[in-house]
Image (cartoon, grey):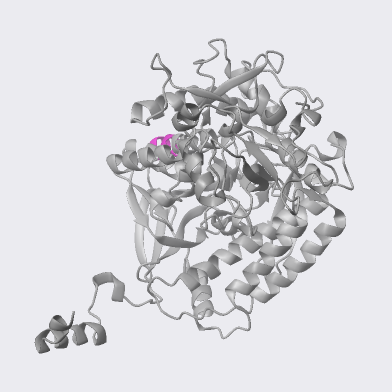
């Protein structure tokens, strides 16, 4: 208002505030070569469900624990999980059994899952749900007060012979949201030291190959930090943002995989990328599988419920790779919906409005915002979209990272662990069952914590010394990025990567498509070596963060494409048009990808699948044709 601006004293004060920015404490600290040192018994990188569960477990045992996250923890991607968490707790089917859950998981993985890890996960599922309930997670309840369970794809009773199972424990359609807030509260209560909005550059490895910490910088003020720890757990999530359209948050850029790859730790089974059947047409926003579990049906442009043609028994509740391929075939054969016939419809308009309000309030809102449809009256236009990465950093069921050496495929990398979507235990194999992801992050987040606690209790908290000049190479790389006058910008290079991945490494793949993608990505890698960071500031430099994230995405994209090109079969989410059958004689094996940071080359080796079980309680599930 004029009467305020007309005041000479106030006008002078406003001018001073604009022309002379005041110091805001740490925000004015300069980016220097000397990092600030920290030491902890255990270091967790990532604050989603896996990271929070791991950090909370170690801290509750009385050991000093740090949790580093490039986000505020409640913005982690776990918050986007909707449908629920699988566990055979018997609310709906009192006879349900964790062994039946394990069978469904092995079958869903197209037999590429490690059966010892699968046994451990499914056996621990009921304990995990009980633990969440005790923490205060507000599960939806039945009328008699038990935890509500809904149907999800690929779930059966009695080893596939007893009909569909309702095994997914749900908190409406906001299970991940409730879980993340619950776990973050537990982390505070247990005394975890949170370093929020810190970007980890690289792992610190000593001359013996042990992981002894990491180097990071504060996004808030640009200060460098060196973390020294006896145990480091990577829980950084997946890399779905390599694609232009996906259900993932912008933060899902494969940072943990990039760190591991640069430290000469391989990544495993990256060719298996899950396309969720029901992303909103256009933006790709997730519509939970729980919508089909509650009775939603898919129809093509002819008004046909087409899933009966592809999965006669399970229809819309077949495994995700089957449903995604079926939708894609309908569209490719001209039976899609809309003027361009480039999507299909998910119908929920036949369900009672009360049911939608009680069990699916989140997607009712999502459909209105992103598709402009009222679920009670009209269908949602949907299309398969990138959702999850089955591959990751290879681990045992204990969470310990492995690096195959010679004839020993399970050599442990001392001091390094991984959990969640960044890892590959491998419980998902070639295709993940819906609602096994929230289970995976908690079971193996807790398993990492238990392994760390056991070691610290037995061996003590003495840390291996940091190597001379630890972290200097990462700091030098950061300075090079900030001072280079490159010819390429982040946005352009990133878009070319996303475009070639979306066109050529998709639901159906051929050798020609994958070779085209490899050529494009090799050029993308070369262009990244001459990239320019235009923002030279030290404070909240998003341009720098996106540049570092891009390198991690390029590594993941290269590994995915090279692995897919080499695997000459169709298995789970990897569907080759030129090799349409599963080949167990040649390809019942894990793909192990090694990255050369000097050349950008990916070398492939292979590691046997664990077809044996962990205990005598469960017998090996023999190979069979996968049908739904």
At a point 57% along the width and 48% down the height, the residue shown is 422
Q: Main secondary structure of the magenta part?
A: helix
At a point 61% along the width and 15% down the height, the residue shown is 617
As for residue 269 lying within the magenta part, the answer is no
Q: Quadrant of residue 297?
A: top right
Location of residue 611 in the rendering, given as x and y in whole percent from the top left corner: 72, 28
Q: Is residue 234 visible?
A: no
Q: Quadrant of residue 317?
A: top right
At a point 36% along the width and 38% down the height, the residue shown is 182
As for residue 458 lying within the magenta part, the answer is yes
Magenta-highlighted residues: 452-459
Q: Quadrant of the N terminus?
A: bottom left
| Residue 184 placement, left or right of 494 | left
Location of residue 276 in the rendering, given as x and y in whole percent from the top left corner: 65, 43
User: Is residue 101 shown above or below 387?
Assistant: above
Which residue is nearer to you in this view: 167 or 338? 338
> Residue farthest to the top?
95
| Residue 583 placement, left or right of 117 | right
Q: Quadrant of the C terminus?
A: top right
| Residue 536 placement, left or right of 99 | left
Location of residue 310 in the rendering, given as x and y in whole percent from the top left corner: 79, 31
User: Is residue 256 shown above or below 112?
Assistant: below
Q: Quadrant of residue 272?
A: top right
Location of residue 484 in the rendering, given as x and y in whole percent from the top left corner: 55, 83
Count of numbered marks: 0
Q: Is residue 533 visible?
A: yes
């Amino acid at each position: 208002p004029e009467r305020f601006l007309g005041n000479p004293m106030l006008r002078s004060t406003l001018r001073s505030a604009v022309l002379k920015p005041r110091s805001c404490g740490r925000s004015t600290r300069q980016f220097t070569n000397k990092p600030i040192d920290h030491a902890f018994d255990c270091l967790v990188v990532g604050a989603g469900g896996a990271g929070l569960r791991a950090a909370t477990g170690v801290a509750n045992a009385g050991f000093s624990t740090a949790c580093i996250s490039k986000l505020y923890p409640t913005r982690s991607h776990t918050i986007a999980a909707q449908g629920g968490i699988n566990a055979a707790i018997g609310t709906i089917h009192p006879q349900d059994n964790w062994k039946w859950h394990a069978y469904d998981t092995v079958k869903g993985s197209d037999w590429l899952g490690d059966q010892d890890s699968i046994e451990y996960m499914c056996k621990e599922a009921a304990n995990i749900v009980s633990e969440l309930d005790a923490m205060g997670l507000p599960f939806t309840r039945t009328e008699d007060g038990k935890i509500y369970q809904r149907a999800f794809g690929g779930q059966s009773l009695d080893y596939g012979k007893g009909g569909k199972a309702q095994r997914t424990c749900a908190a409406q359609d906001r299970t991940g949201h409730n879980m993340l807030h619950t776990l973050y509260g537990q982390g505070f209560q247990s005394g975890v030291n949170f370093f929020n909005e810190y970007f980890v550059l690289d792992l610190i490895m000593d001359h013996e190959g042990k992981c002894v910490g990491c180097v990071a910088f504060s996004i808030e003020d640009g200060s460098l930090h060196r973390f020294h720890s006896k145990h480091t757990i990577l829980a950084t999530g997946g890399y779905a943002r390599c694609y232009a359209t996906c259900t993932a948050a912008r933060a899902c850029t494969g940072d943990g995989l990039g760190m591991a790859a640069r430290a000469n730790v391989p990544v495993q089974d990256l060719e298996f990328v899950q396309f969720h059947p029901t992303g909103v047409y256009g933006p790709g926003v997730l519509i939970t599988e729980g919508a089909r579990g509650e009775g939603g049906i898919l129809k093509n442009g002819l008004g046909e419920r087409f899933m009966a043609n592809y999965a006669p028994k399970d229809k819309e509740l077949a495994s995700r790779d089957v449903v995604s391929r079926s939708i894609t075939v309908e569209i490719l054969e001209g039976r899609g919906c809309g003027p361009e016939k480039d999507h299909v419809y998910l119908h929920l308009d036949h369900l009672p409005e009360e049911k939608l309000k009680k069990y699916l309030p989140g997607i009712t809102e999502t459909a209105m915002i992103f598709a402009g449809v009222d679920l009670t009256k009209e269908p949602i236009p949907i299309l398969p979209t990138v959702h999850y990465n089955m591959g990751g950093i290879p681990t045992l069921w204990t969470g310990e990272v492995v690096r195959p050496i010679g004839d020993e495929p399970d050599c442990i990398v001392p001091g390094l662990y991984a959990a969640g979507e960044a890892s590959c235990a491998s419980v998902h194999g070639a295709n993940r069952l819906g609602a096994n992801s929230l289970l995976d992050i908690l079971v193996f987040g807790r398993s990492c914590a238990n392994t760390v606690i056991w070691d610290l209790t037995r061996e003590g908290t003495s840390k291996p010394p940091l190597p001379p000049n630890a972290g200097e190479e990462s700091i030098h790389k950061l300075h090079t990025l900030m001072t280079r006058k490159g010819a390429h910008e982040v946005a352009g290079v990133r878009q070319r990567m996303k475009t070639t991945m979306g066109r050529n490494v998709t639901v159906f793949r051929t050798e020609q498509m994958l070779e085209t993608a490899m050529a494009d990505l090799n050029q993308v890698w070369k262009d990244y070596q001459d990239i320019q960071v235009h923002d030279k500031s030290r404070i909240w430099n998003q341009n720098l963060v996106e540049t570092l994230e891009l390198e991690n995405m390029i590594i993941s994209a290269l590994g995915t494409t090279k692995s897919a090109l080499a695997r000459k079969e169709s298995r789970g989410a990897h569907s080759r048009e030129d090799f349409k059958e599963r080949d167990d004689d040649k390809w019942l094996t894990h793909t192990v990808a090694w990255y050369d940071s000097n050349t950008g080359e990916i070398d492939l080796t292979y590691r046997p699948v664990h077809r044996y079980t962990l205990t005598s309680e469960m017998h090996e599930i023999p190979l069979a044709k996968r049908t739904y």
